[in-house]
Structure formats: structure tokens, C-alpha cells
Amino acid sequence: MHKGLKWFARISGLMVLIFFLSFFIGEGLSDILKGTGNELVFFIPFCIPVVAGYITAWFKPYIGGIILILGALLLGSFFVYYEDFNMAMVFGIPPLLIGLSFVASVNRELV
């Protein structure tokens, strides 16, 4: 079961990563280049731990999972701070579940 969790986390993490990148390229890059994407510039640092955690989790699932969990909490708290609870759920829950899947895939006793 732990191999299934690891591959579930890898595949769904890749989908979340593609979502982040497509959002950034489609919505934000043109605004940043025009000089009107100031709010996106503040959002990018909160996405970096999620992306770094996913990349780390491919090689070290436990450490990457912990980074993903912390990044998800940080990303969710960013939107909670701006009182946008729907976006906090959309951007916070998927990386949180993926991080938990990576952590649980390391040790059978955690499942």
C-alpha cells in the first residue's frame, strides 16, 4: 500500500504543480510584465515551499512531505489572512493531502 500512496502523491503532486505553473503563466506573467501584477508578486513566495517540497519528495518522500505540509499551511494562511477562505481551501488542501500521502508512504505504521 505504501508504494501506491507514493505514486498517488507523485501523480497528484505533478497535477498540482502543473496547475500552479499554468496559473502563473496564464494569469500572472503577463500582468507582471505589464506592471499590474503586484498582488501576484506577494503570492509567489508562498508557492515556493510547495514546489520545493514536491521536488524534494521525489527523492526523499518524508522530508519532501513535511515541506509540502508546511508549505500548504503557509499558502492557506496567506489566503486566510486576506479573508479569502475559498482560495485557502483550493490552494491549501491539495498540497496538504499530497504531503500527508508522501509522509504516510514512507512507513507502513503511519497508514
Image: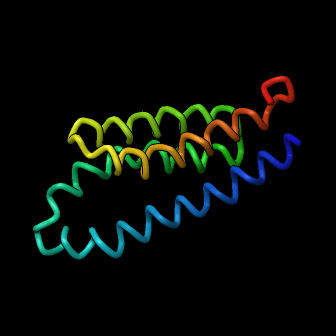
- Give the quadrant of the C terminus: top right
Please state which of residues 87 and 54 is positioned toward the viewer in this rendering: 87
Q: Which of the 4 image quarters holds residue 22?
A: bottom left
Looking at the picture, how far across and down is residue 52, in whole percent? 51, 46
| Residue positioned 31% across, 52% down in the render | 44
Q: Which of the 4 image quarters holds residue 5?
A: top right
Q: Across the whole image, how many numbered discs are drawn on residues?
A: 0
- Give the quadrant of the N terminus: top right
| Residue positioned 22% across, 49% down in the render | 42
| Residue positioned 65% across, 36% down in the render | 100
Instruction: Name above or below for residue 83 compared with residue 25.
Output: above
Q: Is residue 72 left or right of residue 31?
A: right
Looking at the picture, how far across and down is residue 3, in whole percent? 86, 46
Q: Residue furthest left?
A: 35
Color style of the picture: rainbow
Looking at the picture, how far across and down is residue 6, in whole percent? 77, 47
Q: Residue furthest top?
A: 109
Q: Which of the 4 image quarters holds residue 83?
A: top left
Looking at the picture, how far across and down is residue 69, in whole percent? 54, 35
| Residue positioned 62% across, 45% down in the render | 98
Instruction: Name above or below for residue 1 compared with residue 11.
Output: above
Q: Residue furthest front?
A: 86
